[in-house]
Image (cartoon, rainbow, N blue to C red):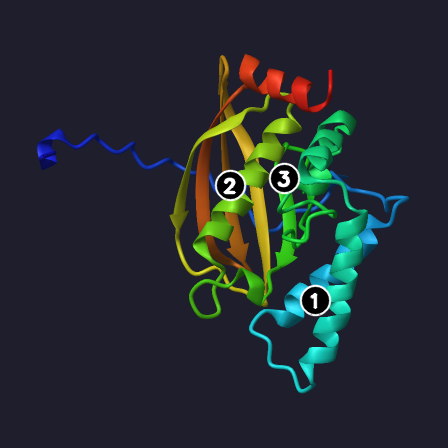
Amino acid sequence: MTTPDQAPARRDRPRIDLGPLRASGAGGLPIDRMDDDEAGVFALVDQVRRIRALTTGAVLDTDLEPLTERLRDIADELEAASAGPERRQAVTWSTGDYIDNCPILGRANVLAPPVEFDRLPDGTLRGETTLGLEYQGPPACVHGGVVALLFDVVLGRANFHTGQTGMTVYLDVDYRSPTPILEPIVVTGRQVRVDGRKVWAQGAIHAGDRLCATAEGLFVMPGDLLVENRRRLSGG
């Protein structure tokens, strides 16, 4: 049985420099934008997002059975025409369009809000979004796991756009105040330090002038395993 004096020491709380992570910012360069795809998947996903938003906590003044039948027919048709998940994963990595499927940025991912980021002159990424009921945890608040997901993506993309990226080793989140749903929020992130294969990044979420959360992440540049996974999935 582990006694209190045997418990592993927790890391010191990260010191977050909020200056560059300000909610207000201008002069950014749009990044990770995705043009409409020829197949029309993005347009299809847009409509699925509408359904997702309208059916979360649904209060609908209509007979749902006919609508459900129509949606079932559409789902059956899509299923019949769709490649399996293994094939779709292979295509994603063979084309390099994995960002399309990101659960925060991806226009092909129905989970994504999606959020669009600008890269400011100092390398900070800044994005604005309003999250709906489907992202709710406590009443009127964004679920804490979704807050962590927002940070994991913005910090990872901030690293990517410096040319020194990696896989998440830890993500240390401080929830300073509730992050609201149905209100605009600003998500920021930037790389702060590199030491060999280790990369550190920090981020913040604001609702207006109110600080909602901060985070620090440690990322490690991937080794042979990830390279081999990408090669295998892309058929190389």
Amino acid type, mark 1: Ile
* Residue 12 in the figure: left or right of residue 52: left
Give how far across and how far down residue 98 sits, in percent: 70, 34
Question: Number of callouts in the render?
Answer: 3
Whether residue 176 is situated above or below residue 11 in the rendered picture: below
Q: Earlier in the sequence, mark 3 or mark 1?
A: 1
Give how far across and how far down residue 93 sits, in percent: 71, 28
Q: Badge 2, how many Cα within 10 Å: few under 14, some, many 20+?
A: many
| Residue 70, quarter of the rendered image | bottom right
SS class, disc 2: strand
Q: Which residue is mark 1?
A: 51
Give how far across and how far down residue 138 sits, in percent: 42, 65
Say whether marks 2 and 3 touch (CB < 8 Å): no
SS class, disc 3: strand
Task: Return the mark for residue 78.
Answer: none
* Residue 59 in the figure: left or right of residue 78: left
- The structure residue drawn at horizontal position 74% and vertical position 67%, both measured from the top left corner, is 71
Q: Going by the picture, which residue comes out furthest to the bottom? A: 61
Out of 115 and 91, give the one closest to the viewer.
Answer: 91
Q: Going by the picture, which residue comes out furthest to the right? A: 38
Amino acid type, mark 2: Gly
Whether residue 32 is situated above or below residue 61 in the rendered picture: above
Q: Which residue is mark 3?
A: 125
- The structure residue drawn at horizontal position 77% and vertical position 65%, both measured from the top left corner, is 73
Give how far across and how far down residue 178 sits, in percent: 43, 61
Residue 119 seen from this side = no
**Mark 1 or mark 2, which is nearer to you?**
1
Q: Badge 3, how many Cα within 10 Å: few under 14, some, many 20+?
A: many
| Quadrant containing the N terminus in the rendered view | top left
Q: Which residue is mark 2?
A: 203
